[in-house]
Image: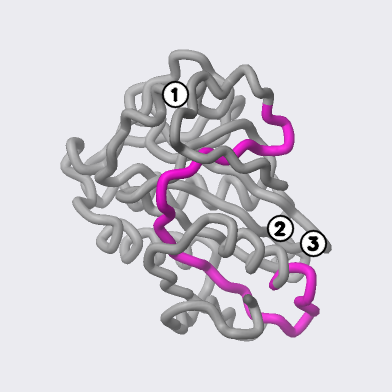
Amino acid sequence: MKDKVLHIRHLGRQDYESVWHAMQHYTDTRDEHSQDELWIVEHPAVFTQGQAGKSEHILNPGDIPVIQVDRGGQVTYHGPGQLVAYPLLDIKRLKIGVRQLVTDIEQSIVNMLAMYDIQAYPKADAPGVYVDERKIASLGLRIRKGCSFHGLALNVDMDMSPFQRINPCGYAGLEMVQCKPLNGPQTVIEAGEKLIQTFSQTLGYHHLEHHQGLAKSYE
């Protein structure tokens, strides 16, 4: 295969719904020549409920909106200080399955945290990445036409209290943790830079092209 190029889109802080709909639009309109992309973003406070989500896992949302979305998984929280990364990949072209993509995403997070001597690991029965049985990164994907969207959320330096308002990922009492107090990456920007590095290495992309914001055609 010729050199694989991954386009990185740095979106800054964007509201959840506009980015979600842009992901849907890109996936629905892409063809076999469309580029693979990784979108790096932070969202204002929002709970998102996956397709398998059960309302009883949303305990007390309060003033934080709850959005029903088309990814796998249960309810999770996004907010400032959390790194969100959306891989928009043609997995058919990459010749990998969904399970391999999940494994590769989890491994890229594990490898990134290992740079900081944080021993993180995935769990076979509960997607995401954990440190000492506490969850540091959540994962939820959707595959359409052989292409992925949605993605991962890594807790970096955020207000963790909203996780108390839900059963994270459907697990009552699941403790969440973040990078900063573990002496991991101290900012979302730092975490994003390191994750781009390990993600591209794990998935075998040889060249990275960086862009600020979304192309107009995605919106």
Q: Nearer the viewer, mark 2 or mark 1?
A: 1
Amino acid type, residue under disc 2 in the picture: Ile
Q: How packed is label 3: few (under 14 Cα within 10 Å), some, or many (20 or more)?
A: some
Residue appearing at x 53%, y 76% in the figure: 6
The residue at which mark 3 appears reads as 146
Which residue is most to the top? Answer: 173
Q: Secondary structure at mark 1?
A: helix
Does 189 sit above or below residue 155? below
The residue at which mark 1 appears reads as 165
The residue at which mark 2 appears reads as 96
**Gap between marks 3 and 2 measured at Cα:** 10 Å
The residue stretch that appears in magenta: 26-53
Name which of mark 2 and mark 1 comes first in the sequence.
Answer: 2
Q: Secondary structure at mark 3?
A: loop
Q: Find residue 48 and report its horizontal and vertical position in percent.
A: 57, 40
Q: Quadrant of residue 25?
A: bottom right
Q: How packed is label 2: few (under 14 Cα within 10 Å), some, or many (20 or more)?
A: few
